[in-house]
Amino acid sequence: MDLGLFAQYTMNGLMLGMMYALVAVGFTLFFGVLDVIKFSHGDVLTVGSFTALATFVGLSALGLHSNWLALLAMLVVATLAMAFLGMLIARYLVMPLRSAPPLNTLLITLMLGTVLRECVRLFYPQGANPKPFPALLPRASVDIGEFNLRLDNVLMLSAGVLVIVGLQYLLNRTKLGLAIRAVAQDEETARTMGINFTGIVLITFALGSGLAAFAGVMNGLYYNEINFGIGLYLGVIGFAAAIIGGLGSIYGAILGGFLFAGLQTVGTVLLPFASAYKDVFAFAVVIAIMAWRPTGLIREKISERV
Amino acid sequence: MGKTSRIAAAGLAAAIVALAGASADAKQKVKVGFIGPLTGGVSVNGIGGRNSADLAVRLRNADPKSKYEYEMVVLDSECKPNVAVQVATKMAADKEIIAGATHYCSVAAIAAVDTYHKFGFPVIVWGAVLPDITYRNKYPEIHRVNGTMINQNDANAALISSLGYKTVAVIHDTTDYGKGHNEYFSKALAKIGKAKIVGTFGVTADQQDFTAELTKIKALNPDVIYFGGLTPIGVRIRSQMDKLGVKAVLDGTSGIVSDAFIQGLGPLAEGTLAFREGAPVEKLPGGKFFMENYNKQKYDGAPEAYGPFAFAAMDMIIDTIEKVGPDRKKVIAALANVKDRDSIVGKITFDDHGQNTVPVITKYVVQDGKFVEWADSEYASGKRKLPGQK
Amino acid sequence: MTDSNSKMPAGMAPGLIALGLATAYLVALLGAEKQAVIISLLVLGIGAVVGAAWLGLFDRVSRSFADHEDALGGSAIVAALALAAYFHEDHFVLLLVVTVLLTSVATLGLNVQFGYAGVLNFAGASFFGVGAYTSAVLNAYTSVPHLIVLPIGGVIAALIGSMLLLPVLRTRGHYAAVVTIAFALLFKTFLEVNDVLGGPQGMQVKGMNILGWSFNDNIEAGGITISFYMGYFLLSLALLIAAFVLVRRLERSWIGLNLDALRLDETAASCFGLDITRWKITAFLIGNFLIGIAGALFGMVGGFVGPNNYTFADSLILVSILLLGGIGNPWGLVVATFIVVVVPEKLQTIQEYRFLLYALMVIGVLLFRPEGLLPRPVRRYFPRWRP
């Protein structure tokens, strides 16, 4: 294959993988501290990107025309709002069900996802229709052979890398991160050490949901269009990525995210049949991986409690 | 106000309403149906059609000479075949609804025709362009006032060839609608024999990411990308073409002729081609009459490309009911003999498949945020040039 | 008072009265056309249910049903027939009732998988779709008798389901959920991109035809026109009865006992020598078989199959019916299916909000009544004896 084309496919795959990884990391964070799956995560992403869009519309109505300022405001508003939403969900829907079977949490958050999605569809003005999302990043591009390197893609990728590195730093190098990891490992011991369990859980949910909002804005900037269904799709893929990577491991989630994007890209480029089969291929591989490694590629370090 | 007096007041109000209803009910009520996509990516077209059909009903109800009072039942097909079958069943199973003006989306219409036939429910299609809707079977229930996609693809291929383009890549959605466009366009292009198709890509109608297909197309480096599909993915494809630096001309069908296409793309829409059967509203025989009355009603959107057809379809249904009475079988019998009937879209004649012939094709190009007739555009006059235009 | 009552076998009267009232209510609701009437009927219904629950009447009814299940089941069938006879001309009402009956069969299948064996299935609608597509393909290209197409639909759903067996058996909890969720998405995408099965456009399904009697023609008898849905109604009712009896028998048998044991504690069950893998496979396949049969018949009723009919969201609705009715209780499932299918259909004003309302309803149930509307009663050692 032509080198330029190869670079182009790699770039496409990296952009997708970054978004998947950001969503998957959220799933893994929640699972770490509470051992639950918060399935509304993808729809939090949708709400985040619509919040960002509403912020943009509001700012333009007020007469603000600086792309950078608008983007900054959108990111801040969406991230904070979603962090708050994440805390609410954790406090009032997830934590009350801690003693119930895990399936109930899965279901309640699935249903909450439906509620969020339907609310966007029904109550955002014309929410059932796809919405154009403003292209706020500089659109300069360089053609290198068949490869079209765009500045906005590079900026988004770097921002994604920065966020993930920042998260790593937070988890591994700060006291807060230590507390989160402690809670994830053993709730009882963490409490004994004087860690405010509820507080840490809420902060973790805020952190994960903020990441989802970031991914939502990124998704909007990349496709220049959002609709009420993006979260369902990205959520399921993020969940699958977190699962094949191995729940509870940040590296697993990132690995899973890029792996899934890789599968889709390979599905398009190398497989002999139509590119529309890429999702069939990717999900079939997910099922196969589950049969091979029932607890994900990077296994959870937890022995069965009897 | 005390409780008793409140009840008394409510009772009085109810009595007045009932009386008013009774006096207005001097005419028999007759229900007619409308189906179109009212939510989803092509909803502007559906809403435009609904408003136009509603206008036909309102004008008739305001006419003291009409025999019946009409009530329009509106259902949403969401432009999905499964939903279309559901709502078609719902409408056709309701015996009080006599006939319907149905479908903008070909995917919805082709899925529902069997249902209409099963229930013996007469319909006039107002916007769907797939030939098979009328021609696959010979159902007496199905009629269509707008044309089919065959003629628009002939015009499309002719224009592409005359502009000197040599290579075309085809993207079409994999519904019957997109496949139909692909088939008729390929045939038309081959007949002229000046340009050739270098690649064909089927995509799903709700696909989000087209970078893979477009990267392949970029390697093929065609002059033109022909797109057989509807507005939502048309918008995505055009904006991702820009992302990947694909410089070809986007050549669309009647499915992208809507304000939503331009709103979704902004300046990127410039230079996109599109084709539609029937003359533009302002050039229609009843165009002025239609627009004046439409604007009087202060609807929440424009009638869009197919609004006049929806008006004509509903008007014909009401005319027929006036003539033969609210009876499905008689309506079907009456619609079998429609010849040179005057309407706002010109003379309507149904052939033995219930298909009207619409010979005029309008060629559009997007210029400065508007669909402009090709002949009037600066691209035709040579003032501006499409990429690669000779 | 209540205590002394519970020691005696309950009479049939409470069950019969409840059944009669429910049927009368359904006739009124299904026949009502004015939105105001429908809304008042719904309010009345909710009020009656809350009031009855408050007065403790439900307890009596459910005991009455438990003690006289066969007799009351028979009366329920008579009630269903009476309902259909009343609406014999009304296409749409009959279609609605058929939808309820077949959805109930499908949820009974899910109930065997999840309610008894504890195997999660988030792809219920997909397997329903497998059945429907089977009847579409077989009716179009072969001359297999249509009645035989139904069990074939069930077998194919079970076969395709068995491709998931290995990952389903090896995984637990969340990891198991992802397997069926991935399958639900894979299935819909596959149907969309695969041209052989009609692609996104779907396929038309030929109607049921038994020995020359076409189900898609209205029946004209002595001046009365009977809707063509009547044939489908009778067949669906027969299917539901068969599925119901099967599921009840299964639950009461030692198979049901084994399934209960392994759901409640897999480790303990395997310590007592139960073959976990075998029972999980049995439950999963039986469940899929039921879902597939229901799907095959529903394909013929609707006359159309398309990928968008069988999405992940539809599977979620099936699961929410299970949860709403009370996991493991077949009676509760039928009631819940009625609520979930009929209410949004009749109440046009909420049509658009139906997904939102389902979701809120399920959240409410999970938070405040996790065991569902009619929870599964505790297994009884002696069928007709109360301590």
Image (tube, helix red, strand yellow):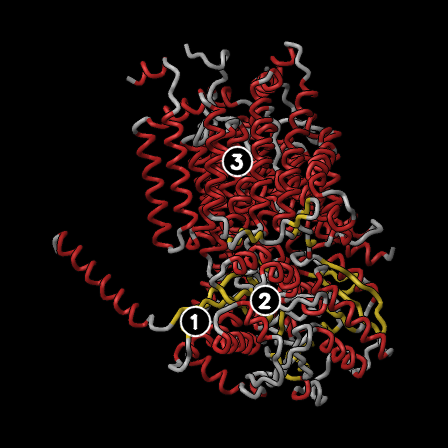
**Tag 2 and tag 1 share a subunit:** yes
**Quick one: quadrant of the C terminus of chain A?**
top right
Name the spot of residue B264 as percent of width and height, x first: 59, 67
Report, in whole angstroms, how far the alpha carbon at label 2 lies from the one at label 1: 20 Å
Query: Which chain is home to disc 1?
Result: B
Query: Which chain is home to disc 3?
Result: A
Q: Are marks 3 and 2 in contact (CB under 8 Å)?
A: no
Q: Is residue A135 above or below residue B282?
A: above
Report, in whole angstroms, how far the alpha carbon at label 3 lies from the one at label 2: 37 Å
- Label 2 Cα crowd, 10 Å radius (few <14 / some 14-19 / many 20+): many
Report, in whole angstroms, how far the alpha carbon at label 1 lies from the one at label 3: 47 Å
Task: Please tell me the numbered disc located at residue B103.
Answer: 2
Kindly identify which residue carries mark 1. Answer: B70
- Label 1 Cα crowd, 10 Å radius (few <14 / some 14-19 / many 20+): some
Name the spot of residue B241 as percent of width and height, x first: 71, 65
Q: Secondary structure at mark 2?
A: loop
Kindly identify which residue carries mark 3. Answer: A107
